[in-house]
Amino acid sequence: MSEVDPARVAERLEEVLDRLDPRTRPAGEELVRVLMQFYGAGLAQLVAVARAAGGEGLVRRLAADPLVGAVLALHDLHPVDLRTRAEHAMAVAARKLGGHAGDVSLLGIDPDGTIRVQTAAGGCGAETVRQIVAEQMAAAAPDAGLAFVEREPGPTLLRIGVRRP
């Protein structure tokens, strides 16, 4: 079976909807909503059956798969709350960032489900840091938005040298 990237599927869906003219786009969006409701109801039933047959541990094991977890999250069926998933994504990103891990921190989650992450202001590698965090957040929390907030730059350090006689 080929690997499906949930972020790429979302991009592709937007591309297809963007090709619709303004008169037919509402019908296309409604079609997507109806299909999401249909699949969501089926997934909810699958989760209930899995929970009854194997308990919460089975549902968590299923959700640990990136693709299954993404689909469950999109239908608000993920057994792990958003904050925990965001914290896990930050921990994975920190491991990947190594020495730059101190340049990012989880600020919180807004009521609308947007995850706010603070990053160092500009600087070398800032875009790479944001990209790694964004990839981990998209994998762990595709049901959430992501906003980066730049940390206020600290004072400029002055180098003081020894004056030669």
Image (cartoon, rainbow, N blue to C red):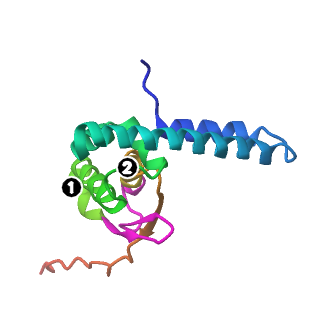
Q: Which residue lies at the image location 32% right of the left edge and 55% below the top edge? A: 85
Residue 34 vertical placement versus 144 (above, below): above
Q: Which residue lies at the image location 37% right of the left edge and 41% below the top edge? A: 47
- Classify mark 2: residues with Cα within 10 Å, few (<14), some (14-19) or many (20+): many
Residue 162 falls in image quadrant: bottom left
* Residue 70: image tag: none
Residue farthest toward the top in the current orientation of the protein: 1
Q: Which residue is mark 2?
A: 78
Residue 122 vertical placement versus 127 (above, below): below
Which residue type carries mark 1? Gly
x%, y% of residue 39? 54, 38
* Residue 99: image tag: 1
Residue 30 or residue 137, whichever sits in front: 30
Q: Which residue lies at the image location 42% right of the left edge and 25% below the top edge? A: 3
In the rendered structure, the answer to whether residue 144 lies left or right of residue 35 reads: left
In the rendered structure, the answer to whether residue 163 lies left or right of residue 22 reads: left
Residue 18 or residue 112, whichever sits in front: 112
Name the image quarter holding the N terminus.
top left
x%, y% of residue 92? 25, 49
Name the image quarter holding the C terminus.
bottom left
* Range shown magenta: 105-127
Contact (Cβ within 8 Å) of mark 1 with mark 2: no
x%, y% of residue 119? 37, 65
Residue 104 falls in image quadrant: bottom left
Q: Earlier in the sequence, mark 1 or mark 2?
A: 2
Question: Looking at the image, how many numbered discs can be counted on the residues?
Answer: 2
Q: Distance between the Cα atoms at labels 1 and 2?
A: 32 Å
